Amino acid sequence: MALSYYIFPFYYFLLIIISTNSLAKTTFHPKTLFLAVKKDPISLQHISEIQQRTPLVPLKLSIHLAGDSVWVDCEKGYQSSSYKAARCKSSQCKLASTILCGDCLVGSVERGPGCNRDACYNIIENPLVQILTRGEIAQDVLTIKSINGSFVGPVATIPNYIFSCAGSYVTQDLGRDVKGTIGFGHQSAVSLPVQFASAFKFSRKFAICLSSSTERNGIIFIGNSPYLLNSGFDASRDLIYTPILTSPYDVVRDKKISEYYIKVSSISINGKNVPINKTLLSLEKQGGTSISTGLPYTMLASSIYKAVTKAFVNEMPKEVRSVSPVEPFTTCFNSSDIGMSRLGFNAPEINVGLHKKNVHWTITGANSLVKVNEDVVCLAFVERRTRDWGEAIIIGTYQMQDNLVEFDISRRRIGFSNSLFFHQTMCSNQNYT
């Protein structure tokens, strides 16, 4: 069966129009919004901040590329005069593609946000610890900032933003003071980019530009390009596009998965093809490639990992000494033997072949090697230990740092910029964050 492309159901558009008629009652019509994104030095997760509730409260939330919705901890300290639980079989529940309903009572008294009578629920996830649980669907005020040219514009507000409530335990390992996640999934009508695009009538797309520094922020652009960095450079101008593949069906959620899957056809190092089992690259055969903000480093199936590390070592200059591995890596080198350039460490060039010939994403030393201490750098890929399930390649955040990656939901495609270091700039080099 050939891979096909998913068409966003027209029924959802009707629901979105109905649900957002009262969402953004304003003459303000931004075309691009943004989120500042900070790399947590301990969890290595990428964290952003929104404002929610009445009165507005700033919330730190982890970026979850495949998440269906925003979910937040409603168990501790959720107070808002504008909170409304979604009732069973309401338009909000239909928009969230759920038929899960029930009552959440303590004795005979409703407890409040996250625990109400006749509520509906969706499945929410903590991608770091693989928690899947139900979250009560609700509405409340939510705001993020807009862009006006090269500067920060007015705040964009949705008064009845649809999100999910979770228990406090679901936030474990997300990072200090992190209260939930922001979902960017393409199969969901209630993901953050889809709700804001529907409310303000701009393109259903977003672009992630993650900073390599824990001190300087990266950015997520939501809506229309250009995506301007300092000096007026448009990071979207030279993108290499590949289609978003149709997602597998998730029996737990009873819907298609919101992961972003792409076709990887080959891997080469310094122009030499790495011998890999092409069957593992097939999504239909339960392999394939996805992109994740939950993994700090790209994960490869065992046979691919071994082939890539062997080829990489063979292409390193002979004077570069191998050293004992440092977890979670297995291929490490003496840092004093490796020089630096404007593209990061001097390292063999990795090219990831995409859906057709001569379309590839280039990974240079800044994204292929990581400094683990003063004396050691390691190949920044990890081995997938489980052998019986899962994607053959999961692209992690380290490989995306200081690249702009655009997710065009409307046109079912993903664009890669390659390293912004080629243009002598980086993701933190902008005026918005």
Image (tube, helix red, strand yellow):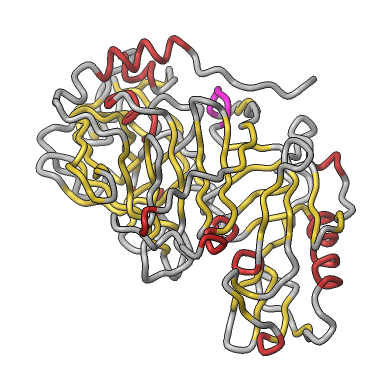
Name the one closer to the observer, 202 or 296.
Answer: 202
* Percent x, y of residue 76: 24, 50
Is 124 situated above or below 353?
above
Dividing the picture into quadrants, the one containing residue 385 is bottom right
Name the one closer to the observer, 37 or 253.
Answer: 37
Q: Which quarter of the rendered picture does the C terminus lie within?
A: bottom left
* Position of residue 298 in the picture relative to residue 65 (left or right): right
Q: Which quarter of the rendered picture does the N terminus lie within?
A: top right
Number of numbered discs visible in the structure rendering = 0
Is 142 situated above or below 277?
above
Residue at 57% x, 58% y is 419
Is 145 situated above or below 419?
above
* Percent x, y of residue 105: 26, 30
Is 330 situated above or below 72?
below
Q: Examine the structure image and report whether residue 259 is included in the region drawn in magenta.
A: no
* Percent x, y of residue 169: 38, 51
* Percent x, y of residue 114: 27, 35
Bounds of the magenta segment = 253-257
Residue at 54% x, 48% y is 130
Q: Main secondary structure of the magenta part?
A: loop
Residue at 86% x, 54% y is 273
Name the one closer to the observer, 297 or 315.
Answer: 315
Residue at 41% x, 65% y is 40
